[in-house]
Image (cartoon, rainbow, N blue to C red):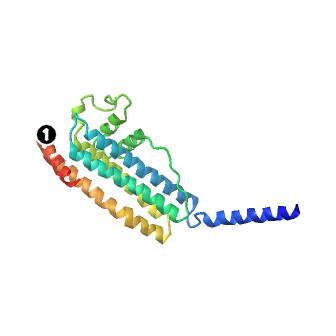
């Protein structure tokens, strides 16, 4: 019996040692939590863009170029989340998938957007269970179903994602993780923000109607 107890104790000690060896010892618990929050944010952005892609494919909107653009953007954000989860696995960390609520990202747009940019009416419209106009937006839906507002919403989200990435970058003194963020996220965020800013400027210049139609065709050829 004593021999069995000794063997059991040694076995438990070995398992404990193995568990300790497999833990993410290079990162603090608070940093791991921030990494998981970033994964959740990337998935929220992907969910938003997926909703916008399907919105612009509706028969009463019919802007296929915008639909393709947001479909591509949704895939990119999902890839960002996947890449960070894969990195956490590589470093022996444990990622945690949290709830994703479409309305939460609409609220974040309205919270973070500069005063001169449009509110998240398209987001709230697509999130509404009834499919009707949200009470916080104009009842005249044709005033806000255009592509410029969607681009402004996307710019707000990309700025927010970029801010959180910079906070994550400042939270670590691990050179490998810093380089991972710089190579796979930060540079791409700078270009995404510039691209969206350019698109918004062009859409302001062209206006609705024929100008938006021609811009939509240009997006169609790119995506």
Q: Position of residue 188 (x, y in %)?
A: 33, 61
Residue pictured at 50% horizontal, 69% vertical: 174
Mark 1 sits on what residue? 209
Residue 172 appears at what percent x and percent y? Answer: 50, 65
Question: Residue at horizontal 31%, vertical 45%?
Answer: 153
In front of the other: 216 or 156: 216
On the image, the x and y values in percent for residue 80 come to 40, 57
Question: Residue furthest toward the left?
Answer: 210
Determine whether 189 is above or below 111 in the image. below
Q: Quadrant of residue 135?
A: top left
Q: What secondary structure is found at the residue carrying circle 1? A: loop
Q: Residue at x 31, y 52 (%)?
A: 73
Q: How many marks?
A: 1
Q: Is residue 71 above or below residue 32?
A: above
Q: Neighbour class for label 1 at 10 Å: few (<14), some, many (≥20)?
A: few
The image quadrant where one finds the N terminus is bottom right
């Amino acid at each position: 019996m004593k021999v069995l107890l000794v063997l059991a104790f040694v076995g438990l000690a070995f398992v404990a040692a193995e568990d300790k060896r497999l833990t993410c010892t290079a990162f603090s618990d608070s940093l791991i939590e921030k990494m998981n929050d970033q994964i959740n944010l990337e998935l929220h952005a992907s969910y938003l863009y997926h909703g916008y892609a399907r919105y612009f494919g509706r028969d009463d909107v019919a802007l296929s170029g915008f639909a393709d653009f947001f479909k591509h953007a949704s895939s990119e954000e999902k890839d960002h989340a996947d890449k960070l989860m894969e990195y956490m696995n590589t470093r022996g960390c444990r990622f945690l998938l949290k709830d994703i609520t479409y309305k939460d990202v609409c609220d974040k747009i309205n919270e973070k957007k500069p005063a001169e940019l449009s509110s998240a009416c398209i987001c709230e419209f697509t999130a509404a269970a009834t499919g009707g106009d949200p009470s916080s937006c104009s009842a005249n839906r044709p005033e806000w179903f255009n592509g410029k507002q969607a681009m402004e919403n996307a710019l707000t989200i990309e700025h927010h994602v970029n801010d959180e990435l910079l906070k994550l970058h400042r939270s670590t003194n691990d050179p490998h993780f810093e380089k991972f963020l710089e190579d796979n996220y930060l540079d791409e965020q700078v270009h995404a923000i510039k691209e969206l800013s350019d698109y918004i400027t062009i859409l302001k210049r062209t206006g609705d109607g024929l100008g938006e139609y021609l811009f939509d065709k240009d997006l169609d050829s790119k995506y």
